[in-house]
Each structure stands twice: as C-alpha cells, then as structure tokens.
Amino acid sequence: MNCCWAPFLYLCLLVSQSRTAEASQETLHWMEKMEVAAKSRISTSSAELIHGLELRLLNASFGGHNLTLQTQIIQALAFKLNCNFSGLSLSSAALEKVPQARPQHAMQFPAELTRNACRTRSRDLRLICIYFSSTRFFQKDINSSLLNNYVLGAQLSHGYVSNLSEPVNISFWHNQSLEGYTVTCVFWKERASKHHWGAWSPEGCHTEQPTPSQVLCRCNHLTYFAVLMVCVHPVWMRVVRAAEGSTSRTEQKGKSWCKGQKSNSKGFKGG
C-alpha cells in the first residue's frame, strides 16, 4: 500500500507546487501590465487594473502563510489569517526586496480586524496589502501632492472592514523637511468624483506627527491610504500681506515660494 501511495502523493505535491507557481506568475504579470499601462498612458482604467490585482491576490494559491510579489513601483502581499488573529505589524524595513534608500512605511492591524467576519463561524481569511510608490493610478491635484508618492492599501476577504473601535495605524516616514506644508491623512474613496474613479477623503482618519520625521494615520477602516500635502504660505507671508494690503502680489509670492519648495523636494511631487 505504501509503495502505491508514495508516487501518488509525490504527484499531488508537484501539481500543487505548479499551480502555486502559476498563480504567482499570473499575478506578477498583471502587476507588470499595470506598470506598462501607467507609463504608456494606455486607456485601461485604473479601477479595472487595481481591482484585477486585488482579485488575483485574494484567490491566489500559495504555500506557507504569506506571499510577496514586487515590481518597480508596486509591492503586493497576501496573508492567510484565521479567527485566532491577534494583530499584525508590517514594516517596509523588514520586507524583502524593498530598497532601504526609500523612506520607510509601516502598517499595524488590530486583533479586531477579523471579528465581524468570524462572528458567524470560524473560517479562513485572507489579508492583502498593495503598496504603490507612484500616484499614477490615483487622482492628481495640482494644488497638492502625496508624501513620498506612497499609497498604501489593505483589504480583507469576506467583506468591507469599517468602523473599527481600535484603528489601523499607518506610518509614513520622510527624510525632508515638511516646513511650509500642511499634512492630512486621507483614504481613496471610490465613486466620490464625477471625473475620476475616486477622490481623496479624510473621513475616518486622524492625523498625528509623533516626530518631525513621521506622519501617523489612525484610520477606522481598510482601503488605500496616503498623506496629502498642501503647500501653505510661511508666517511672514501673512505679515507681508497685512503690511502691503495687496492680495495679488502676496499670492504671487506665495505661489513662487511653493513652486520652489516642490522643486527642492522631489520625493513630495506626484508621480
């Protein structure tokens, strides 16, 4: 009996490994397709590309507890979870294939994340994270930019996660001064714009700056997150405005100052 079963089990193992490799390659090819579409401005919609990647990650077969895939501007991760989930912390410093020269980021998920999905019965869950180091798939605003060009997303299988009593913590570190900017944690709200597939919104997110080099976003839901930066006039501009009594001159000076700030902060400009 053992002699008969051994070849069969070995064949099953090979088939399983082959399917896992095929699923990973198919997902990686989709990510590469997204990059080509972004660089060449192909008409394929950003929503279609991103939702396609989400679907592939949620359904991909892989061994072990997690899967990591990466291209030049996209990193995708998938984690197998269960109802004994006690929380998860992810840091770009600990993830493989992430150039350490880039500013770091981190996400911390509370144990409450799986609670609603596990209320009916125990089930296997999957958490996917998609990190973009470019804003090409999201709406641009000429009056603002995104810190480090980072957009960090997360999604749980079996339903939308919202109204968490313990927030998801998303940290963005930066290596340049934020003087002259106001920063706001935002999430991508689909169908919130008539001209694009979504828009940035601060709803459900609280912005903190624990240190001069860190912006901490505390949000009560899962989606795509970023830090919106808006250039503001320095204090002396308000003094000049009051002294001169000329709005047009001071506004022009303010715009020139902000333009100079952007040219000196390449990491802050939209991709």
Image (cartoon, rainbow, N blue to C red):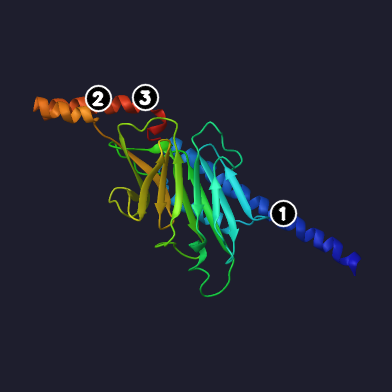
Q: Callout 1: few (<14), some (14-19), or many (20+) C-alpha neighbours within 10 Å? A: some
Q: Which residue is mark 1?
A: 17
- Note whether residue 53 is visible: no
Q: Please report whichever mark, 3 or 2, sits nearer to the chain's N-terminal start.
A: 2
Q: Is residue 234 left or right of residue 16?
A: left
Q: Quadrant of the N terminus?
A: bottom right
Report the Cα–Cα distance between label 1 and label 3.
Answer: 49 Å
- Vertical arrangement, residue 110 with respect to residue 26, above or below: below
Q: Quadrant of the C terminus?
A: top left
Instruction: Give the amino acid type for the residue marked by disc 3 in the picture.
Output: Asn
Q: Residue furthest bottom?
A: 120
| Secondary structure beneath label 1 | helix
Pointers 1 and 3 in contact (C-beta within 8 Å): no
Residue 69 disc label = none
| Secondary structure beneath label 3 | loop
Report the Cα–Cα distance between label 3 and label 2.
Answer: 12 Å
Q: Is residue 168 left or right of residue 258?
A: right
Q: Callout 3: few (<14), some (14-19), or many (20+) C-alpha neighbours within 10 Å? A: few
Instruction: Give the amino acid type for the residue marked by disc 1 in the picture.
Output: Gln
- Rendered residue at 47%/65% (across/down): 159
Q: Which residue is mark 3?
A: 264
Q: Which residue is mark 2?
A: 256
Q: Position of residue 259 (x, y in %)?
A: 29, 26
